[in-house]
Amino acid sequence: MKTIALENFNLAGAIHHHALHSPHTTAVASQDQTLSYGELAQRAARLASCLTASPDWQRRDGQAPRVGILASRGIDACVALLGACWAGATYVPIALKQPQDRILTLLAQCDLSALITDDEGLKLLTGRLRQACPKLVIHAGQPTLTSWDNTSQPLIQLTALPPATLSAPALVKASDTAYIIFTSGTTGTPKGVMISAGAAQHYVIMICQQLGLQASDRALETCELSFDFSVHNMFSTWQAGAALHILPATTVMNAVKFVKISGLTVWNSVPSLAGMLRQIKALAPGSLTTLRLTVFGGEQLPASTVTAWQSAAPNSLIFNLYGPTEATVFCLYQVVSNPLALTPGRDALSIGMPLPGNDAKVVDENDQAVARNTPGELLIAGAQLSDGYLGAPALTTGRFPTLEGRRWYRTGDLALCDELGRFHCLGRIDNQVKVMGYRVELEEIDAHLRMVCGSDIVGSVAWPLADGMARGIVSFVNASSIDAARTLEALKSRLPPYMLPSRIIALDALPLSANGKVDRKALRQLLDTQAP
Ligand code: AMP
């Protein structure tokens, strides 16, 4: 697709284009179902006409209506999300694997005009959660018998809606919010990152060109909608007019077989998935020969993963992409070449240089740019910056400062820029960690731990580490003893599974740093020395 009409920033624009020009080409496939561009557009348009016909469908305070997507990754989730886009809405993915209370907090923050679910999402909509739903709830899955009582609130079945004419997606301005993705928040409440349609559209068009994606590509989807890597996977694939193949959540460990059977040409995942496949010895040399392109991103890329990947996928170019949700998916890139561009003193890949339209600099504590090879905080600017956090103006101002007339985002990453202008990630300056690709603020776990165990002094650490990446969480509580099983049970109703500690340990006195804070480094050392 060569040209795009940029007057309309609707993310569904590319689907509409391909539905008109190559309607029979596969747009999305999962285990048992395939939709062509024509079929996908038809379903999205049908959903959109139901949304826009609703009496509550209107802009509020100048903002596009918001539509929650409560769905696991799959074709129904793609239809739900594209239906919301087609109608000109802001889509808000809601992860299924999180406690009810957390979903309720999120719903309370969003003021949704509608909610679209798949079969899995529908199962969750009982009791308090159902009461917190907007009036319009649409089921995009198979119409099955459900316990949904239609007398107080109807459940609309997508399959029962009349076919819609394939009119163009609603007009969306560059400044409208395309999506809101929630990430872990230090205070204990997740924060909603708002991404404008202009930023999203810039990213999608730019990355599709940068990677050289083609209509003949068959690309892998490994992410849930609540992780912004999914924005890359879906929309860069559809921008190119290529086919998206969704790896079922139940067969993640069979990803290599999935690639082979489906003849995939593009791999997209966090490096942790490749690390896990390597660990279970699924990455045999030459096992991924159909791949021509590999996109790793979202967390540190270990050299050991790259080496194993180069031998498993000898025909594939590898990209290491870096970026926070706040700068629209990815904003720096490094093409992997031999010898590997390694970060000094670490067995991990450089994060490279800014992608077109993005800018990066490393600053000291006074926000002054530092010299080459000097560590400092990495700041990002450019076309992809988020408008800020939903309903949190003070937090937004703090994280998005204007320096010398330009707006920047403070990543919280410790980094340096080498003499070649390549950036290197050296870790965090705060307590944010990545656990198997998920972004976690350790303070969020601590905040909930304090509430459930009644002790003010607690500390969580990412542990153990393998290839420099966290495999789990261990929490410590200042107490002579603790009922770990009961505490964990209580945490389960507050935190998603990937944030739950694998162990909760009571210590008579938690080590403190010079400024009186819990010394997480000392806690990690304690675990290291005790580990067999
Ligand atoms: P998220 O918002 O979930 O995408 O997480 C963003 C954070 O993940 C960044 O601030 C980094 O700490 C880390 N990160 C993302 N991509 C990379 C990468 N390629 N290499 C190292 N760290 C990364």
Image (cartoon, rainbow, N blue to C red):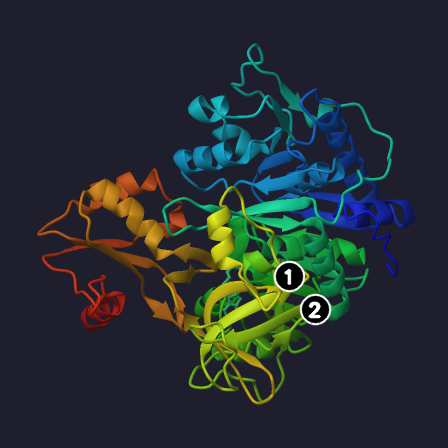
> Which image quarter holds the N terminus?
bottom right
Residue on which the image places disc 1: 259
Mark 1 vs ligand 1: CB under 8 Å? no
> Can see residue 298?
no
Depth check, front residue: 313 or 176: 176
**What x and y, as percent, mark residue 498?**
40, 51
Residue at 51 percent across and 86 percent down: it is 371
Residue 450: numbered disc: none
Residue 290: numbered disc: 2
> Can see residue 396?
yes
Seen in the picture, residue 210 relative to 446 is either above or below; the reply is below
Q: Indicate left or right for 25 with 309 as reference.
A: right
Residue at 51 percent across and 47 percent down: it is 393
Depth check, front residue: 349 or 456: 456
Tell me if label 2 and label 1 are in contact, CB under 8 Å: yes
Q: Indicate left or right for 5 with 151 as reference.
A: right
Q: Secondary structure at mark 2?
A: loop
**What x and y, as percent, mark residue 424?**
51, 78
Q: Residue furthest front?
A: 404
* Residue 329, quarter of the rendered image: bottom right
**Distance from the alpha carbon under mark 2 to that under mark 1:** 8 Å
**What x and y, as percent, mark residue 55?**
70, 20
Residue at 70 percent across and 67 percent down: it is 357
Residue at 73 percent across and 38 percent down: it is 88
Q: Amino acid at mark 2?
A: Thr
